[in-house]
Amino acid sequence: MRQSKRFPMQGTDSCCDDNAGSTLDSGQPARRARRGAVVGLVALLVAWSAPAAAQGDPGAAYPARPIRIVVGYAPGGATDLAARLIAQKLQEAWGQPVVVENKPGAGSNIGSEQVARAAPDGYTLLMGTIANATNMSMYRNLNYDTLRDFVPVSQVMSAPSVLVVAPAAPFGDLAALIAAAKARPGTLTFASSGAGGSPHLAGELLKLRAGIDITHVPYKGAAPALTDVVSGVVSMGFMTALSAVPHMQSGRLRPIAVAAERRLQQIPSVPTMAELGLKDFEVSSWSGLFAPARTPPEIVARLQREVSRILSLPDVREKFAAQGAEPVGSSPEQFRAYVRAEIDKWAQVVRASGARAD
């Protein structure tokens, strides 16, 4: 008799059910292991890709720690004021401390040399000035080269110079000042923020254009120079509008002339040098942000974008304009071209005047 083939009924505790259960039990750990391996691999790739992305674009993770902006002058001058305004806004935007460090002396060379030797990582910057152009000619043994050892980031501001005297000075206008200097050659003095800066070379230009002999007295920054002009310790000084306008408006300084193409809106009654007979007498002080050479272009670009944004803010523009300064916000290429032109321009004045700082 033929035996019928038996099939297990659903729901019975058959061997097949047991086998099915054992098959699932043995396969699930394998699949879980494979899934775990895939997840682990993905996590590892993500972990690897983050540093790789940061290495490919150093600007992506910048800044990750505090930034230092070095100023080569004492606190209180035009460069210091500009640096502190930029530092405050950078700190607000990036959430990292941005500290201004004053390193006055040697016509701003002490601070400049320090930044030139700093690590090119974007965490040590220089708020440079016209002195970084003029010092190329003023010093025979300069320990840095502005175009070789720095990356220009952006010009921050430009401010014309103003010839000022103390309220009690015996000369009330440029003609009287020139007459007094010619009557007593070498006895009148002029202050500057340091050898090689725009106030120094403006004084040298005055000597050339007016044919007078006045003595240069350098200080470690605009603030101490300004103090001694106000008190009458020195006879006169060329000060940037950014430093001088508040003191002129308060009556602590008496302006003689503006070294600019046109009069300043903040002091419209003060004539230009050209109006008073000294042609081609335009001297503007400027400041700009530099990084050490070989700073990654991505970091330079991020700094430049943020500085340009800051300089376009209405409150920042108002603060500069109220004191006779013009915010700029140039590209690194534009700033480099401007610095190169300034180096060439002031080299001619240095040669003609014979001025030297060492």
Image (cartoon, rainbow, N blue to C red):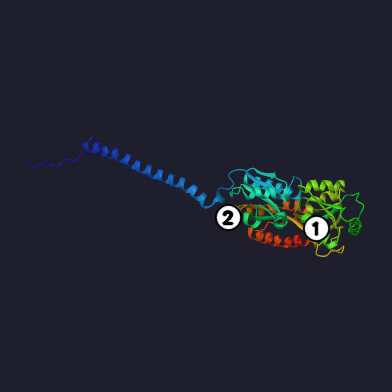
Q: Where is residue 353 in the image (x, y as percent from the top left)?
A: 78, 60
Q: What residue type is labelled 1?
A: Glu
Quadrant of the drawing holding the N terminus: top left
- Mark 1 sits on what residue? 204
Q: Where is residue 246 in the image (x, y as percent from the top left)?
A: 82, 49
Name which residue lies at 66% across and 47% down: 69
- Out of 15 and 305, give the one closest to the viewer: 305
Vertical comparison of 27 with 346: above or below: above
- Out of 94 and 248, give the one closest to the viewer: 248
Name which residue lies at 71% across and 58% down: 137
Left or right of 35? Residue 19 is left
- Count of residue discs: 2
Of helix, strand and loop, which one carries label 1? helix
Q: Which residue lies furthest to the top in this view?
A: 13
Q: Where is residue 171 in the image (x, y as percent from the top left)?
A: 91, 54
Q: Quick one: label 1 or label 2, which is nearer the N terminus?
A: 1
Left or right of 175? Residue 21 is left
Left or right of 241? Residue 32 is left
Left or right of 252? Residue 66 is left
- Tell me the crowding category of disc 1: few under 14, some 14 to 19, or many 20 or more residues within 10 angstroms, Cα based: many
Is residue 312 something one can see in this rendering? Answer: no
Between the residue at mark 1 and the residue at mark 2, the CA separation in whole angstroms equals 38 Å
- Mark 2 sits on what residue? 297
Q: Which amino acid does label 2 sit on?
A: Pro
Q: Where is residue 164 in the image (x, y as percent from the top left)?
A: 85, 53
- Tell me the crowding category of disc 2: few under 14, some 14 to 19, or many 20 or more residues within 10 angstroms, Cα based: some
Q: Which residue lies furthest to the left in this view?
A: 1
- Out of 149 and 41, give the one closest to the viewer: 149
